[in-house]
Image (spheres, grey):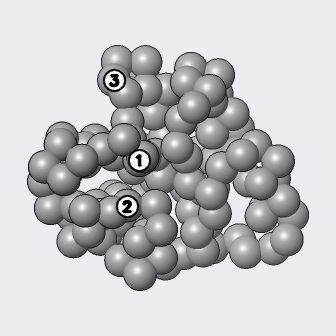
Amino acid sequence: MEGKTLGEHRKFLVVDDSSFARKMCGKSMHELCPDAEIVEACDGIEALKCASDATFDLMIVDFNMPGDNGIEVAGKLKAIDADANIVLCTANIQQGSRDSASELGIGFIAKPINTEKLKQYVSS
């Protein structure tokens, strides 16, 4: 998010098959960046369409979803935009998940998502 100045429009993508998780993540993001636009996607296919149509300052991607998992989706998002700022969000906090995220060059947040965990990725 470097290069953004206060008041500049920010756009975030939240990818999760749970509508509740998307809403909670969006709520936390709005607490940190009240004027941001939050776009939601329920799976990898929808996320890829969103990323093809727009540029996002940050993409939060759930690991466990129908179809491609979050690592696979993040890899495809990186193919669309190599500089994409992506964070994997998962309840699976095993080292293998962390390593996979690190190898792909994306962040990692353990569920449940909250404002405190998002602070390092979203700033006002």
The answer to whether 9 is drawn above or below residue 93 in the figure is: above
Numbered disc 1: secondary structure: loop
Question: Of the residues under marks 2 and 3, which one precedes in the sequence?
Answer: 3
Q: Quadrant of the C terminus?
A: bottom left
CA separation in Å, label 1 and label 3: 16 Å
Numbered disc 3: secondary structure: loop
Question: Of the residues under marks 1 and 2, which one precedes in the sequence?
Answer: 1
Residue designated by label 2: 122
Identified by mark 3, the residue type is Ala
Q: Residue at x 60, y 74 (%)?
A: 110
Quick check: 75 left or right of 45?
right
CA separation in Å, label 1 and label 2: 8 Å
Identified by mark 1, the residue type is Met
The answer to whether 4 is drawn above or below residue 93 in the figure is: above
Q: Residue at x 42, y 46 (%)?
A: 2
Q: Nearer the viewer, residue 35 or 51?
A: 35
Residue 94 lies, in percent from the top left, at 81, 73
Which of labels 2 and 3 is toward the front? 2
Is disc 1 in contact with disc 2, using a CB cutoff of under 8 Å? yes
Q: How many marks?
A: 3
Which of labels 1 and 2 is toward the front? 1
Identified by mark 2, the residue type is Val
Numbered disc 2: secondary structure: loop
Residue designated by label 1: 1
Is disc 1 in contact with disc 3, using a CB cutoff of under 8 Å? no
Residue designated by label 3: 54
Residue 17 can be seen, yes or no: no
Quick check: 105 left or right of 103?
left
Q: Residue at x 43, y 18 (%)?
A: 52
